Amino acid sequence: MIYSETLKHVMNFSALALVLGSAFSVPAHADEAWLKACANAKTADSCQQPFQQGLAPVLMGTGREQQGLWGYIDTSGKMAIEPAYRQARGFVNGLAAVKKDDLFGYIDAKGNLAIPARFTRATDFNAKGTALVVTDDRLALIDSKGAVIKTLPFAASLDSEGFKQGQPLASVQMQVSPALWNAATGRSVSLPDDVMNLDEPQSGLIPAQQRDAAQSGYWGYLDDNGEWAIDPMKLKTRNEPLLNGDVVAVKGKTTWSFLDRSGVSLSKEQYKSVKPLASGSWLVVDANNTQQLLNNKLEKTQEIPAEQAEDYQTWGSWLIGKGSKGVVMIGPDNRVIDVKANKPQWLKQNGKLLILQADSRSGETKTPQLVQIFDSNGVGLLTQATLTALNEFKLQPLNTRSIDDNSAAPSSDLPAALLTPVDKKKTPAILTAQGEIFTDPQWSGLIAPGRGAPLVVKTENGQMGAVNGNGQWVIQPKFKQIDAFNGNYTWATVVDDKNAESRKIIDAQGNVIDVPTRVLQSAQGISGESLLYTEGADNARRWGIWDLASNSAKIPARFTQLESFQDGYALAKVDAGWGVINEKGQWAIAPDASRSGKPQPVGDNIFEVADGDQPGEHSNTRYSLYSAVTGLLLAGDLQSNPQKIGDDHWLIQPASGGVALMDDDGRSVVSKEIIPQTIRIDADWALLSFSPHFGAIDSQGDWQIAPIYSAPLNFVTPQNWASALSDKRISLIDANGVEPMADKDSALPLASMDRAVMNDDSTGETVLFDTQGNEIQRYPGLNSIDASASSEGMVPVRAANGLYGFIDDSGKQLIGSYFTQVGPMKDTRARAVKQDTYGAQIGYINGAGSFTILPKFEWATDFSEQRAWVAAKGLVQLINTDGAVQAQLPLRCNQRVILDAKGKQIWPAKAVNCANPAQTGGAQ
């Protein structure tokens, strides 16, 4: 049954202007748009509906009306129920849902109001005499007298047609509650059923919104056990609050106020914005747009300059803000440090905060100027004398990261910065980690460092050595060349007594490692304590590892490719493919020729392998996780990269659907069969939210199929099976949610046939099965059987020539493949197009494939109760199965009327007279 809400595109006049503009030379007025649409062959199919129980809804009216009204005609074309309804559905079990003004009710076949209009949505009654409606913003089940017999939860909504004819279940959409998982305990927190939203923990509690309406609810706080620690009814706020210790900030319509955990007001002051600080204090903006710092007793302690506090970030236990004229630092003890700076920047470096500003000096290319370096206690390390002296240099900070980079920083005995003198005649210098400027008259150049110390320095006599973070020599300047250090070893150029140069490897103290010449000559790179080298040439080249500390072969040269060690493991390749080796050269993850991907470390000695297309999939990458400790597969066929949670857990999403929390040993400790819409991770916590999903209820409103599917469920008789989409996976389910053909999850059920069809991607064929999964017949081409048009024991099939015929449940061809398009067989008639003979015109064929009604229609509907709607030369007609016209619905004198087969007006009863000024608009 087509619900008349599909006419929303007809009622949408702005959208209709595009349609009508192409059909009429004069644009239609807004109040004529729906009428013109009903007279246009391209859009008129939405102005009448199929027959059900002897009656069919039709949209009637005049151009004077902003929109038409729905009435009902009988099979002879006579108006049985006068047009009076803004929306209408067909009759089911003696009742039809209609919309009068703004609400729905139900009428009987005589047009009498059987159930008063009091619903905002209404659907058809099922065979047991119940129907789904929306009343008072709640989805409810009513009986045939209109009495509510069950009210569904606020989270349930009607985003389907409710109970369809012949189906015992109705598809209902449910807003799935969020999930809260804890990696430390390996469990899912049991939440109250009415929780609709969660957020990251605040002061040890979880912000949660308790639903009390379809799309809204009050916020409170849950403890680790899922119990209400702060009752939402105490706070009574629909905006998410902020908890800091025992103080809760809640937002009204425009301003914030402070309450205690019981909802009692703590202050009469109102603020435009509030921000909790780790110390229990608050940063607020008052009605005068003044930023203020409040202590944990909500007492004002200090005003914050607005030009220095536009953008806030957290650095350790400090809150730091910056604006165009400086930086403000608020410490855990509420100490405020005010730093003036022009267009400031900030970086962190080995537990310290560097504040820089735009270079105000004139001259060559400018670099940021250092304003101050603060330690974690808020102590500035640079004296005024040092800051003044720094004006003579260009600054290059070393080993810095952005404030929001929380990755672990390697410890390094490097200076805080390299200093290049503005006066090129002067000696370069360094800024030590203690904030002092140091230089040496021997220095002529500082080499940009690698990832490690010491710092390589070039002297005035052209020799190179290296210094520590304080500028003291740790490698005397006796080498012609030294590469930057990325670990404990690097390359250096040595000059012997005969002035001959050679490349050697030295350690961080300048000791030369006497690696055999054959190894040095084939060396490919230094990795930590090891040297990657090769033996052989071309296809016979093999890689191995030389241990620099022991100056011996650690792993013989036997790999076709080898990469650097990281955290005790390295990627290695042999003929069978890529694998992972440990520091002894043993396979931690053995190569497998069936894997196309290359292992990549993700942490915790776990490696991820991305593989390409899988059978039956198209351009989908799948991921697998392997343990380098055990060499075993932890999880396979994942559809996305894993996400780390806590110390030893991972959030994974299997390609089959759902999400799970897995530990480092590959055990799934918590799982859910729905793919999350959003994922937020906060230390050990994973907060998962989900989009609305569909399930199915029975005639008493009880769930028969859990809401885990991402599209409405359409059950097909006689099996009562449905093809169900669960996020990215399609499965075939029965009325209990069980998969009757588990090995054929993408099969589609065929109505009226006790059969199912499925594509075989490997052969490019469509396969017909019985309900036991036995193969009956194969047909060339994918999707060659049109499952959506299965009816009356036959289904359309597309042949290799691209034309359609029909087969029965044994796979036997009942109608040859002669037709360009066909519809389902209804009342022993099927819509058909035979392009090579009749062009694009539509006709109707019988069960033998003969045209019983010759093609002559621009559009046509399927038959229902021996009647079909068609358009012939732009005129909407009602025909029977012999093609005889029963009624015609033209546009006459700017009004939609009903004529009999001979053109005599039968509705309205009074003849339409175009001479009447109120009915001008032309006759059709």
Image (spheres, helix red, strand yellow):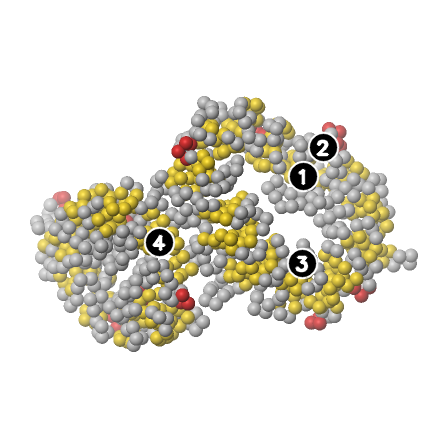
Residue 882, above or below 608 = below
Query: Which residue is denoted by mark 1 in the rendering?
Result: 351
Regarding residue 805, the answer to whether it shows in the image is: no
Residue 439, above or below 854 = above
Query: Which residue is denoted by mark 4 in the rendering?
Result: 695
- Could you say where residue 840 lies in the image, as x and y percent from the top left? 27, 66
Query: Which mark is first along the chain, 1 or 4?
Result: 1
Query: Which mark is first along the chain, 3 or 2?
Result: 2
The amino acid at mark 3 is Tyr
User: Disc 1 vs disc 2: which is toward the camera?
Assistant: 1
Residue lying at the far right in this picture: please name it: 497
Query: Which mark is first along the chain, 1 or 3?
Result: 1
The amino acid at mark 1 is Gly
Asked which secondary structure carries label 3, the reply is: strand
The amino acid at mark 4 is Gly
Q: Residues within 10 Å of mark 3 (few under 14, many from 20)?
A: many
Point out which mark residue 569 bears: 3
Residue at the (22%, 70%) spot, across then down: 845
- Is 419 left or right of 783, judged from the image as shown? right
**Contact flag, marks 2 and 3 (Cβ < 8 Å):** no
Residue at the (71%, 62%) spot, across then down: 584
User: Disc 4 vs disc 2: which is toward the camera?
Assistant: 4
Query: Which residue is denoted by mark 2 in the rendering?
Result: 381
